């Protein structure tokens, strides 16, 4: 397998899962500005959507979309518990979380990266995100992870997205459960390894 990634982008979530599951996988960095990979390939030929992550399977097939790739990787190593068994109520709950993170957090935070965003639009996005953070903090409660006592692919995705907050000047201090969650996930060996490999920490 090969994971096409860009440092700190949503592709970091499957990168974390690869390390947590101890799966063999090559990494290839993508420059999202030029759409070229570190080996000089045109990324549009790999993923015409133009964004990471993209996972090249051993048979040459390409998987895209973070939530799908995360589940694929978890199912390669079911003994890790990174995703509940397919078809179970717990698996559908995991899928619910992955869709929430993708649509209500990831896609709401994405526009804030645009340098030309107008103040009114930014405030609207922050208000909406604040409502989502309220929900998240309430659902986390005293549990260490989204699904309770076990780290899953949903935590890899949520950590990746929430970790954008400092870059986007989003203050998470009104939600101490979220700041505690971020700090806790950041200490996990697989998270630190992925971040180190992406050049985000030393």
Image (cartoon, rainbow, N blue to C red):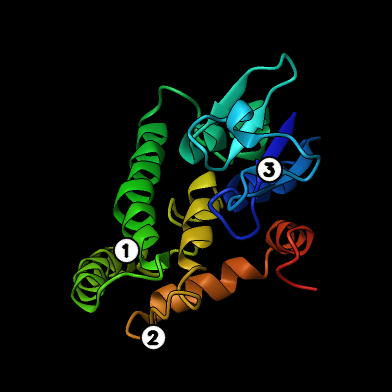
Find residue 173 and name its label: 2
Outermost top residue: 59
Res. 78 visible in picture? no
Q: Is residue 104 above or below residue 41?
A: below
Nearest to viewer (mark 2 / mark 1) = 2
Res. 83 visible in picture? yes
Q: CA distance from mark 2 to mark 1?
A: 14 Å
Q: Is residue 99 above or below residue 199?
A: above
Residue found 40% across the figure and 70% down from its top: 115
Asked if residue 58 lies left or right of residue 87, the reply is: right
> Circle 1 is placed at which residue position?
136
**Upstream in the sequence, badge 3 or badge 1?**
3
Instruction: Tell me the crowding category of disc 2: few under 14, some 14 to 19, or many 20 or more residues within 10 angstroms, Cα based.
Output: few
> Circle 3 is placed at which residue position?
36
Q: CA distance from mark 3 to mark 1?
A: 36 Å
Out of 119 and 21, give the one closest to the viewer: 119
Asked if residue 96 lies left or right of residue 166, the reply is: left
SS under mark 2: loop
Residue found 35% across the figure and 31% down from its top: 89
Give percent across and percent down for residue 101.
37, 51
Nearest to viewer (mark 3 / mark 2) = 3
Out of 47 and 200, give the one closest to the viewer: 47
Nearest to viewer (mark 3 / mark 1) = 3
């Amino acid at each position: 397998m090969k994971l096409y990634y860009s440092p700190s982008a949503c592709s970091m979530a499957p990168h974390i899962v690869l390390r947590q599951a101890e799966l063999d996988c090559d990494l290839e960095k993508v420059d999202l500005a030029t759409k070229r990979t570190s080996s000089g390939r045109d990324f549009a030929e790999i993923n015409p959507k133009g964004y990471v992550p993209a996972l090249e399977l051993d048979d040459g097939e390409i998987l895209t979309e973070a939530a799908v790739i995360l589940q694929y990787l978890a199912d390669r190593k079911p003994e890790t518990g990174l995703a509940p068994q397919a078809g179970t109520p717990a698996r559908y709950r995991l899928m619910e979380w992955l869709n929430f993170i993708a649509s209500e957090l990831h896609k709401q935070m994405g526009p804030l990266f645009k340098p030309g965003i107008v103040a009114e639009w930014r405030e609207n996005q922050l208000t909406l995100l604040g409502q989502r953070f309220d929900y998240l903090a309430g659902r986390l409660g005293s549990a260490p992870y989204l699904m309770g006592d076990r780290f899953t692919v949903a935590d890899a995705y949520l950590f990746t997205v929430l970790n954008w907050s400092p870059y986007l000047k989003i203050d998470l201090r009104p939600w101490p459960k979220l700041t505690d969650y971020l700090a806790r996930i950041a200490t996990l060996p697989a998270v630190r390894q992925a971040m180190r490999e992406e050049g985000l920490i030393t």
